[in-house]
Image (cartoon, coloured by chain):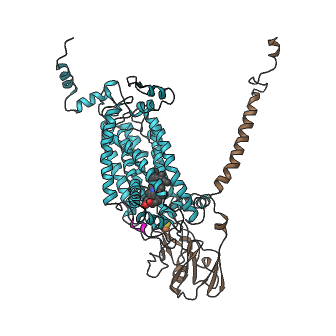
Chain colours: A brown, B cyan
Amino acid sequence: MATDQAHVPAAGELTESGERRRDFIYIATGAFAAVGAATVAWPLINQMNPSADVLALASIDVDLAAIKPGQAIKISWRGMPVFARNLTQAEQDAANKVPVSSLRDPQTLAERTKEGHTNWLITMGVCTHLGCVPLGAGEGETKGDFGGYFCPCHGSQYDTAARIRSGPAPTNLVVPEYAFKSPTSVTIG
Amino acid sequence: MSFPWAKHYEPTTDVGKWIDSRLPLPRLIYDSVGAGYPVPKNLNYFYNFGVLAGVALVVQIITGIILAMHYAPNTGLAFNSVEHIMRDVNSGWMLRYMHAVGASFFFIVVYLHIFRGLYYGSYKPPREVLWLLGMVIYLLMMATGFMGYVLVWGQMSFWGAAVITNLFSAIPIVGDAIHTWLLGGFSPDNPTLNRFFSLHYLLPFVIFGVVILHVWALHIPGSNNPTGVGIKGPQDTVPFHPYYTAKDFFGLGVYFTLFAIVVFYLPNSLGEPDNYIPANPLSTPAHIVPEWYYWPFYAILRAFTVNFLWVPAKLWGVLAMFSAILLLFFLPWLDKSPVRSNTYRPLSKLFFWILVVDCLILGLCGAKPAAEPWLRISQFAAAYYFAHFLIILPIISRIERPLPLPKSISEAVLTNAGHSVEAARAAVAAVPQPAA
Ligand code: HEM
Ligand code: FES
């Protein structure tokens, strides 16, 4: 009697191909739970990314008229400082004299300024090493060994085109997106 | 596990019996910090720091929860709310100083605890998991201390947050995305401060949980001891209570005395005056330094000033800094010598002390401006740090001839007392035996 029924393979028995029939159910359940967990996890992780109000890009207008050659100003943009510097002829010449191939992040002064406005060097005031504000834009601050900017945090030195010349920073100070509205005013962002 | 000769908990009162068969909490306490836990009888004062670390954690949690009742995690209010705690809240100045000084003391205690483990080989089998859990606690403490320091929202808070979160931007490809994700923006701002407050509140409780696992892992093999020789029998141990409860309470008294001296007379001696200037995102202080307990790692970070092997200097620094900590996780498998205690390892002992000096030099470099000669010194000291663990230690454990080990803890104790073992045995034999 009972032996008759034993012909039906029990759930734990192997099929011809060597799997147990339960294996499929285990894998299907596990896979379904994993997909579900990942779906829930993503919003939990993504909530830490910048919120809509932080992302709403602000742009600002800056009047450059008051900046004399050799001077610079610091502007706050998106919570970060931007340096706007009016290069003297000597500073531009110094930047142009450097062989570009010798640089860690090779760029010419012309590539880092706008055509016809090569005296206006506008960069982020954020060291590309670990984000400190380099010295050199304020009155009386040290400009470092290369006449541009000096980062006090770990000693990065930038030249008169704000290109990295020595120290741990990997790249030149970033040039933000900006456009000249008139010869003496720009819109940043 | 406990040793077979451990005393057994026997509830004597009816209430004791009633609770023992329902929730045997008194039994758990008896078996883990009471008379039911046999401990090597030769532990020295370096073995006090585990209990002290636990107490330091509790002090941080109690004072922290109170500070959170008065603190406002908002960039517009945070700095002023800390000043409000200092000036207006009843005893607020004391609570904040206890919390700030308490963090430093916590690290002092934990550093001594770690170096104790290094010296006596406590990371070796069978205590590897215990060591790994300790390292997890250390990492969590570093994260907690860092985020707590940001909460003040002074100049050092802000620029510390800027620099440390920027470390992650060195990771190729995904680095910038991680950096933005951590901050919740492009520079430290209100979202950053808010999440740091939330996590600074959470992590100490996570630490508490890992501490429980750490103690559990300790109680399986039992404590190591200054000889590093395993326990052989009842003559090697004493019950935790009253012997080590008494010793730990004495240590605690000394600890609280020193703590009180710093809290009441030197509360700002371990901090940076610049953090009493409100955060200014447009101007970095001329000389930014992290809290002292991060100095050695900060020095390693800054030691890399040039690109080499196609890897940028910035990434080198970050990798080196994180590996300096992660390296310690592999210690049980780097030092293969079967002898635990440096007392019997003349070469290893010598290099242990060189490592201590090296760490102090790194710490000094981390506190100094990023200029010569400190950069050059930190380069050598950082190279030595890695060489110690990756080259020197594995070689020593192969070539060293250890001194003869005592046969047991009790033999070592008796020899140490100024007599030879034979003399001690003779003395014991000479004592008139009571008549049978
Ligand atoms: C592992 C344990 C902890 C460590 C190492 C730690 C560390 C720190 C540090 C270094 C500071 C900055 C101190 C200063 O300069 O003022 C701080 C501040 C703070 N912590 Fe903690 N903390 C811990 C646990 C907690 C807990 C459990 C809370 C509870 C919510 C808490 C709440 C706060 C608050 C509100 C502040 C800001 C007020 C202030 O600066 O005094 N902390 N913490
Ligand atoms: S942040 Fe400028 S050198 Fe490190």
Work out whether A38 lies above or below B170. above
- For image coordinates 35% across by 60% down, the residue present is B267
- For image coordinates 50% across by 79% down, the residue present is A137
| Quarter of the picture holding the N terminus of chain B | top left
Question: B265 or A81, which is in the foreground?
Answer: B265
Question: B6 or B128, which is in the foreground?
Answer: B6
Question: Horizontally, is B431 left or right of B218 in the view?
Answer: left
For residue B165, say whether it is visible.
yes
Work out whether A85 lies above or below B217. below
Q: Main secondary structure of the magenta part?
A: loop
Residue B427 included in the magenta stretch of the image:
no
Classify residue B432 by image quadrant: top left
- For image coordinates 41% across by 66% down, the residue present is B87
Question: Horizontally, is A139 left or right of B242 in the view?
Answer: right
Classify residue B236 by image quadrant: top left
Question: Horizontally, is A157 left or right of B362 in the view?
Answer: right
| Quarter of the picture holding the C terminus of chain B | top left
Image location of residue B44, percent across then percent down: 30, 38
Q: Please report the bounds of the magenta region as a residue range.
A: B266-283
Classify residue A85 by image quadrant: bottom right
Tally the marks.
0
